Amino acid sequence: MTKVINGFVLENEDKIERAIYGSTADKGQLKGGLVEKYPIVDEIPEEELLVAYDKIGGLITKDGLKVKTGSFYDLKTKSARKEPEVLFIDRIDGQEVELDESEAKAMKKVKVKSDELKAKAKKAKR
């Protein structure tokens, strides 16, 4: 089960649970989740869940595009970003590159068109 927050898809159910309830610490107790601050799960602000999920490296996508880890949580300052710095990650010629949203969407269109052309060429060979 995924969760969508402001168009961002939290893809990993286990990490959603860890962001909410924490990770197992000493003696099997859960520690570090948002329930420490918000005992009632339904009262957890979605933006804080997004930040906590990003903090633990959960996969986030938007429109099928992979969002760079650390877009909502600054790993250097160890705090939520006041203004998210959303970048997208893609592979181009085997290299991982960071793209802004418009670049990522343009790249996705190119890949879809390329896949369509490859399928068309393969079908024509038959």
Image (spheres, grey):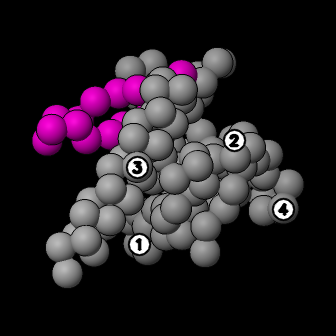
On the picture, is 98 further left or further right than 105?
left
- Picture quarter containing residue 85? top right
Which comes sooner in the sequence, label 3 or label 1? 1
Image x and y of residue 118, in percent: 27, 60
Callout 2: SS = helix
Q: Residue at left 27%, top 74%?
A: 123
Q: Give the label on residue 103, or none.
A: none
Inter-mark Cα distance, 4 to 1: 27 Å
**Residue 33 falls in which quadrant of the image?**
bottom right
The three-letter code of the residue at mark 2 reads Glu
Q: In which quarter of the image is the C terminus?
A: bottom left
Magenta stretch holds residue 88:
yes
Using a 10 Å C-alpha cutoff, classify the residue at mark 2 as few (fewer than 14 neighbours), some (14 to 19) or many (20 or more): some
Compared with 63, 96 (above or below) is above
Question: Gap in Å between the C-alphas at discs 3 and 1?
Answer: 53 Å
Residue type at tag 1? Lys
Q: Could you tell me if residue 7 is visible in this image?
A: yes
Residue 18 visible in the current orientation: no
| Mark toward the start of the polypeptide (2 vs 1) | 1
Badge nearest the viewer, 3 or 1: 3
**Residue found at x 25% / y 63%:** 121
Vertical relation: 56 (above or below) 28? above
Question: What's the magenta bit mostly, secondary-structure-wise?
Answer: strand
Which residue position holds label 1?
27
Does label 3 or label 2 sit earlier along the sequence? 2
Query: Which residue position is annotated with label 2?
Result: 48
Magenta highlight range = 85-99
